[in-house]
Image (cartoon, rainbow, N blue to C red):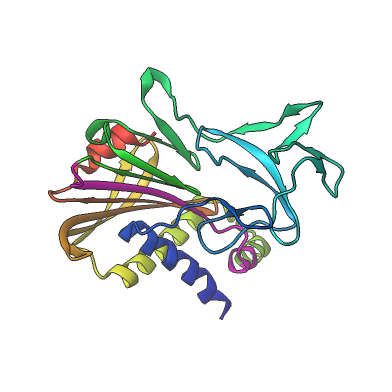
Amino acid sequence: MKRWRLKTVLAAGALTMAFSMTAFAGWEQDAVGYWWDNGDGTYPAGEWAWLDGNQDGTAECYYFDASGYMLAGTTTPDGYTVNEGGAWTENGEVQTMQTGQPAAEAGIPSWTVGNLQVKQTGDFANAVTLTGDNMVQMITPDGTRSAVVTLTDITSYPDYQEAAETWQAMGLDIHSPEVNQLYQAVLVEIVKAQLGEPAGVSEYSCPTGTWTRLEYGNVMQLSVNVYLDVLLKYENGSYYGVTLTGAAPNNIEGFMNDCIG
């Protein structure tokens, strides 16, 4: 049964990538106070969390009580100070962490997803951009093209930790190229099981590494015929997905070279 938990996680991520029906993380407020919606029905509780609520590329650190509400203007249970906005401060200075670059060089907006830089340029230079937790979606103004870049970290899942212990006992490194290839193959099969057999499967190499491309061609998506391409890459406990949809065949090379760095 444990093996299937990891497969369920990967399958859910695959469907999110392919159909672009992403729930977005963000602040919520009720009569009690503020809390953070992770976008998947969960929220931090009894812990600290680095959050970039205004998507300016800089995250602040907030503490949430056991019920999930943000503490503000007080001292946290572990002895740190948070200001009236809830942000952790030291000597009156808000502590921050860089998470992206909404104002990148040459005026090109960009965002960080894991170790990828997603840039709003090329065919998507004037796109409408939506961002969530480890997700960037760009949609051209005429609505004929969409690109979704996602990251899922699986290192906290019991299956992954169990496998790591097993491989280490066998003298294998879970971050070795051989293990990465194994997880990549598993991910591809899970996506195929969810979306069906693609018209073609191939390797695509670019500066960000070697990806597996699943080319679905012209398919029905939300009652509209679109061209669908999914690119997948597993790397050291995280898997990346790039999903392109368009009214015409997708320019894979152009997108990966222009928009992904």
Please tell me in which quadrant of the rendered image residue 97 appears: top right
Judge left or right: residue 20 versus residue 42: left
Q: Position of residue 79 (x, y in %)?
A: 87, 43
Residue closest to the far top: 106
x, y percentage for residue 171?
Answer: 64, 59
Residue at position x 51%, y 76% in the image: 4
Which residue corresponds to the image point at 39% horizontal and 38% vertical from the top-left?
A: 208
Q: Nearer the viewer, residue 24 or 135?
A: 24
Residue 44 visible in rendering:
yes
Q: Can residue 218 be seen at all in this image of the molecule?
A: no
Residue 179 lies, with reference to residue 106, above or below; the image says below
Horizontal arrangement in the rendering, residue 166 relative to residue 110 (left or right): right
From the viewer's perspective, tell me whether residue 174 is left or right of residue 120.
right
Q: Is residue 149 magenta?
A: yes
Query: Residue at left 37%, top 21%?
Result: 107
Residues rendered magenta in the picture: 142-162
Q: Position of residue 251 (x, y in %)?
A: 19, 42
Number of numbered labels in the structure image: 0
Front one among 5 and 101: 101
Quick one: which residue is furthest to the front in this view? 31
Q: Is residue 11 above or below residue 154?
A: below
Which residue appears at 43% of the width and 24% of the height?
Answer: 104
Q: Which of the 4 quarters of the picture holds residue 66?
A: bottom right
The quadrant of the image that shows the C terminus is top left
Residue 50: say if magenta.
no
In the rendered image, which quarter contains the N terminus?
Answer: bottom right
Where residue 80 appears, as percent x and y from the top left, is 83, 40
